[in-house]
Amino acid sequence: MSSLPPHLGRYLDDNRERLVETTLDLLGFDTQNPPGETADLISWFAQSFDDAGFETARVAVDAAKPNLVATLPGASERTLLYVGHVDTVPFDATNWTYEPLGERVGDQLYGRGATDMKGPLAAMFVAALAYAETGTTPPVSLAFAVVSDEETGGSVGLPALVDGDYLTADACVIGETTCEAGRHSVTVADRGSIWLTLEARGTAAHGSRPMLGTNAIDRLYEAVTALRDRLGERPFDVDDEVRATIEESVDYYAPRMGEQAARAMFEYPTLNLGTFEGGEAINSVPERARARLDIRVSPGVDTRTVLEAIYSHLTTFDDVVVTESRWSLGTAVDPESPVVAATTSLAREVTGERVYRRSATGGGDAKRLRAAGVPTIEFALGTDTAHAVDEYTTVDALTGNAFVYTALPYAFADRLD
């Protein structure tokens, strides 16, 4: 392929089976989180990067969940960062048809983490070896962060590297699989979030005489329903750059959920009533109730203004109070920025299909890096089986990822000022 120097292309062709074997090696480590014990796999990466001539640094806030940073100097002071997490969600082996710690069947590789994200991580590692083992100086410096504790959103993985100033980069690609139902994408944004705990107090009474009490469940559900309706009347106002990302996001999600639902997801806040608790007996009027809400807002929207509106609205319900709140701002990368343009172009070269530049519906490690000022995207080919029984990836997805990750330093450097 034209965007990759021929000798690196030959290296990838010659090491196709090595890529498969590396993926199976990674799958063979049991890194279910919880408990998230990843030290053995991080040691494997540390030794492998050391052997290839990379400078490595092991960073561990929790000894059971360490992180690794490996670097290779390039021809310029610009740095491209690759990030991959080694922990996986748990599995019940009795429900699997194939070995959850790695099994190849034809061109499919099964195992927990095959697509999320040990397969993409193996492709990143082979891309690193392509430079090291051919003696090629990359056009920009390369850094690889192999992190723990992502699946439970813990603080000892990537957040520890960011907070400790262990990562300095001009752009970053995270190997999260970004395809769904045969559509390919580069994730360039995420949504802001508001997590609220609401509580209501009523007056207890016998269930046969509810008019003598105040039902806390009724009152709290009324407040949640009114809040959902009110948020549905607040369309977002975003700038042109974010608007372009929203439009591609709607196009991406519409085949799965319908155009109207996809547009509503980005044009208005969404509210999910995650838990609702209250009452002690069927024949008693409940005097207490609690609800937990997950509210999401589009990138480019100041989450704080939405939160202020929520608090203002809830003042009309005297017996409903917010007892806990957490919030985050959505983040976005300019869809025309060098890392986005380079990755999108390479992904089109591999797939021969449209590659959407879209927002994620949630947020993860990319949000943390963008908030720290590093333009960050997510990209990997894979399958729709992340977290599922019989999770798998394919040899074609692995090789496609290896090509993109290997060619990306050149495509990225070509687009820098």
Image (cartoon, rainbow, N blue to C red):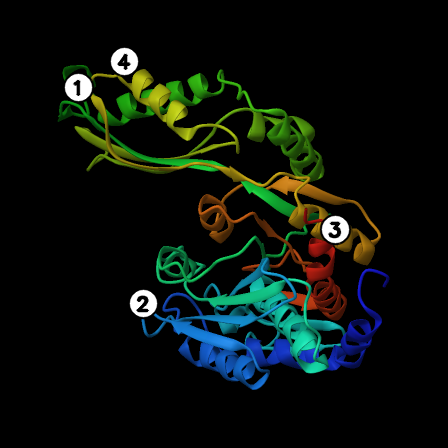
Q: Residues within 10 Å of mark 1 (few under 14, many from 20)?
A: few
From the viewer's side, name the closer residue of 288 and 153.
153
72 vs 327: above or below: below
Disc 4 from disc 3: Cα separation:
47 Å
Residue, disc 2: 61
Residue drawn 19% across the image and 31% down it: 288
Image disc number at residue 182: 3
Residue, disc 4: 316
Disc 4 from disc 2: Cα separation:
45 Å
Q: Earlier in the sequence, mark 3 or mark 2?
A: 2
Residue 305 picture quarter: top left
Q: Secondary structure at mark 3?
A: loop
Q: Secondary structure at mark 1?
A: loop
Please report contact status of discs 3 and 2: CB closer than 8 Å, yes or no.
no
70 vs 262: above or below: below
Q: Amino acid at mark 3?
A: Gly
Q: Earlier in the sequence, mark 1 or mark 3?
A: 3
Q: Amino acid at mark 2?
A: Val
